[in-house]
Amino acid sequence: MRSSENRVVFGVCGGLAERFGMDPIWIRLGFVGLALLLGKGVLLYLILTVVMPKAPAPVLA
């Protein structure tokens, strides 16, 4: 699920980091690397934005 708390643009990297128990900066660097080296990072990010469901907003008590 896309993260509703740890997001910079759409929350894809934050959601992947939460799922795999990683720091989101490593996921973000991976997408930047894919974008710069292969040109596929932006396309993959946009596909994941459409495919991944958005996480519900946290409830404030």
Image (spheres, grey):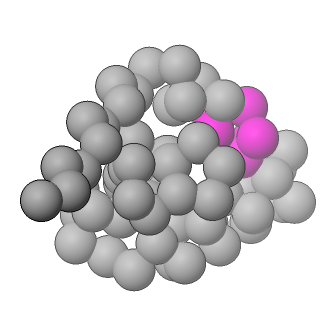
Residue 5 drawn at (x, y percent): 39, 59
Which image quadrant for residue 29? Answer: bottom right
Which corner quadrant of the image does residue 31 belong to?
bottom right
Residue displayed at 51% across by 31% down? 48
- Where residue 33 sits: x, y (%)? 74, 66
Q: Is residue 19 above or below residue 44?
A: below
Q: Is residue 59 left or right of residue 53?
A: left
In the rendered view, tell whether residue 57 sits above or below residue 27: above
Measuring from the top left, give residue 21's x and y in whole percent.
22, 72
Q: Quadrant of residue 40?
A: top right
In front here: 60 or 44?
A: 60
Residue lying at 20% horizontally and 56% vertically, measured from the top left: 60
Q: Which residues are magenta?
A: 40-45
In this picture, residue 10 sits left or right of residue 17: right
The picture places residue 27, in percent across and down from the top left corner, at 51, 66
User: Camera-side residue: 24 or 36?
Assistant: 24
